[in-house]
Image (spheres, coloured by chain):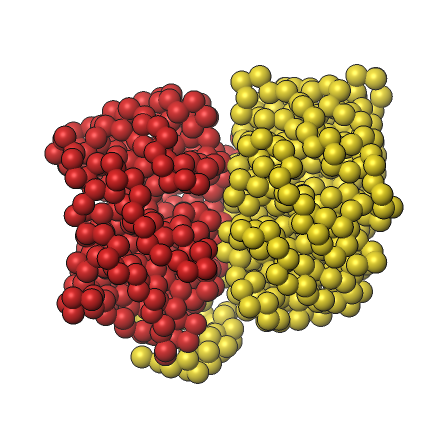
Chain colours: A red, B yellow
Amino acid sequence: MINRRQWLQSAAGSAALLGLAGCASTPFATTPAISTGTGDLGVVVERATGKLAIVNTSQPRVLAEVEGLGDLSHASVVFSRDAASAFVFGRDGALSRVDLLQRRITGRVMQAGNSIGGAISQDGRLVAAQNYQPGGIKVFDARTLELVADLPAIGADGKASRVVGLADLPGHRFIYALFDAGEIWIADLSQPGVPKLTKFRDIGKQPYDALVTPNGRHYIAGLFGEDGLALIDLWDEQPRARRILAGYGRGQAPLPVFKMPHLRGWAVAGRHAYLPAIGRHEVLVVDTETWAEVDRIPVAGQPVFAMARPDGRQVWVNFAVPDYSRVQVIDTPSRRVVRTLEPGEAVLHMEFTPRGEAVWISSRDANRVSVIATDGFQTLAQLPLEAPSGIFFTSRAARVGL
Amino acid sequence: MINRRQWLQSAAGSAALLGLAGCASTPFATTPAISTGTGDLGVVVERATGKLAIVNTSQPRVLAEVEGLGDLSHASVVFSRDAASAFVFGRDGALSRVDLLQRRITGRVMQAGNSIGGAISQDGRLVAAQNYQPGGIKVFDARTLELVADLPAIGADGKASRVVGLADLPGHRFIYALFDAGEIWIADLSQPGVPKLTKFRDIGKQPYDALVTPNGRHYIAGLFGEDGLALIDLWDEQPRARRILAGYGRGQAPLPVFKMPHLRGWAVAGRHAYLPAIGRHEVLVVDTETWAEVDRIPVAGQPVFAMARPDGRQVWVNFAVPDYSRVQVIDTPSRRVVRTLEPGEAVLHMEFTPRGEAVWISSRDANRVSVIATDGFQTLAQLPLEAPSGIFFTSRAARVGL
């Protein structure tokens, strides 16, 4: 039996063993594990320099940096089904595939003039990018990056629309919102050569972002052009878009809005969703069975991301300027802020480890990522990185709608 | 752009590309991915021959078989945090670690005389085994398989108890039930040399299995010695065990019980749990907010596993002898059986792919595993394996309580 000190020391020494070759294996003998799995890997976007840092969350540490990814402002990432590759959607319209084990770019296409994110199909075979310029979405074979479908988004008004809020649905389907046309579309690519479109018209003015709930049931789009949100229950036999939360805030915001909340980060914990209010220093609590607001929690600034720890026990919130150096933690059973942290200037993103024991937080202007324990709130590590923004872990590969 | 036929052909040919070495990488050129991630791997227990089949769920296919694992009847598996290793708990008391990429045993300890499963800590550093003989649990370092803690389970009656229902909790904690003593214990191994035990006495007679809900909040133990179940809300400030579902069935079962349901498989979909009734041809629907029964769904036999597709839209059910060659699918919004399948004799286990597009079903006496699409129910593949039982995919590494 070993004591705690020996245990910690042996764990610290384990990194040195990675990469050692072939120990003989005999029954009942124990040899160190030497394979490299991809379940505890991830990436951090270094937006100013067009680099992607490959990280390990078990240690935690930076394994490598991959350069040459172009304009990574507002970049987002999805992962291959085997969790070995990251697909990076750059603002400049580039779709790049980065191999996490080889630590290099294994594919790259300039697929649009101005892009704002993407998604990967349930079976991992199709990758879709949503575009501002020229609008619409493009769908690629995840293995070859060959174009499988080019789907312009021409609204009922006959004009090309920018696309936002792209997410995967079960089957070979993607759902997305047309900002200019005020529509929501579902593209079914079961037969890639013959894409089938389902269109929801008049869903509200200027949907600016959207999300699918963790169970894949509800699609919710925020509306820039009016108060409230558009909701579709995808499990309905005849799905239709309806308006919810008419008092959500956009139309009557008493404060100037410094940064629009990111909807993709909306937290669903148990039967409640925790939504960043627009322009107000509040997080809204919404009942996902009735879609009525049931509470408002005062927070330290205009919330940008509200993200649930994987077990839903906590929701972590970051803020727009001038409060963007703070992070607050909401305890969901009591709906109270239980902790305020200041991990470094300009907090842009947060990502929980797969089972939630820690959260990684990027502080752009402090040039670091902080790794913080979610139970005791102690800082476990600080990783120096250049202007870090988005953080994405491979456990996303097994989740719907991310 | 490619058509569907080309797309399918290129996908079918992709297997041949795996393992090819170093294609040169240049920006804007696309080379095939050659790294092997572990996100789409898994194992199937071949109980009669003491073998573990390593499988890939993207293809789907059997990659290799690993021999020499001893008595694998009722064996269960958890995965390392990097998803590269499987920890196998054998009925003969052996704990084996199998490397999925090297396809061999990298560690093995005989840790007890008779064992019935195990768990891995939230951070992946501790592996715990629960034992019938000599009772209690043993905790090991996941990397070295060194013994970290040996915790006998001596109940209030002063006697050693068999342990069942072991599961991980946040932090370095494990929860488990004492069959003979009628107690539930939590072991906190934050300081492995000084384990801290929390004991719940008089929780009910003969807890025979238990589960943690997917959010880690509730621990529920089935009772063999009386009707009903024991429930602990782990989020309470002062958690306590209470009795629920007094009419659950054990005490007044009108039918002989051919096989006790496996609680670990209980399905939580939205706010409802779907529980296999004991001895009755029914699945019970329970409200997880009130823990009251709200419905009963008639099914084709005595249910053993009731498992929710990852999105909760379906619950799949298998049965005890003599109905053990059938599988039924419940549509959760309507609570109706929408499909009955007969994938092969003696269905022992089911496992969903990470995002739920397919389910793998083991048919012991048909010597095969069937891979079935969960939307259209077509059989996608049949894999010949010897007397297959438990199926476990690496996506479990990122989940609580599995």
| Horizontal side, residue B169 vs residue B46: left or right | left
Residue A203 visible in image: yes
The spot of residue B29 in percent (x, y) is 29, 71
Quarter where residue B59 is shown: bottom right
Nearer-the-camera pick, A30 or B341: B341
| Horizontal side, residue A317 vs residue B135: left or right | left
Quarter where residue B194 is shown: top right
* Quadrant of image for the N terminus of chain A: top right
Q: Residue at x 21, y 42 (%)?
A: A227
| Horizontal side, residue A374 vs residue A341: left or right | right
Q: Residue at x 40, y 52 (%)?
A: A233
Q: Residue at x 73, y 30 (%)?
A: B246
Q: Residue at x 67, y 69 (%)?
A: B383
The spot of residue B11 in percent (x, y) is 46, 75
Nearer-the-camera pick, A297 or B295: B295
Residue B72 visible in image: no
| Horizontal side, residue B322 vs residue B348: left or right | right
Nearer-the-camera pick, A171 or B369: A171
The spot of residue A154 in percent (x, y) is 20, 68
Q: Is residue A162 above or below residue A313?
A: below
How many numbered circles are shown? 0
The spot of residue B382 in percent (x, y) is 66, 71
Q: Is residue A261 above or below residue B100?
A: above
Point out the residue furthest to the left here.
A256
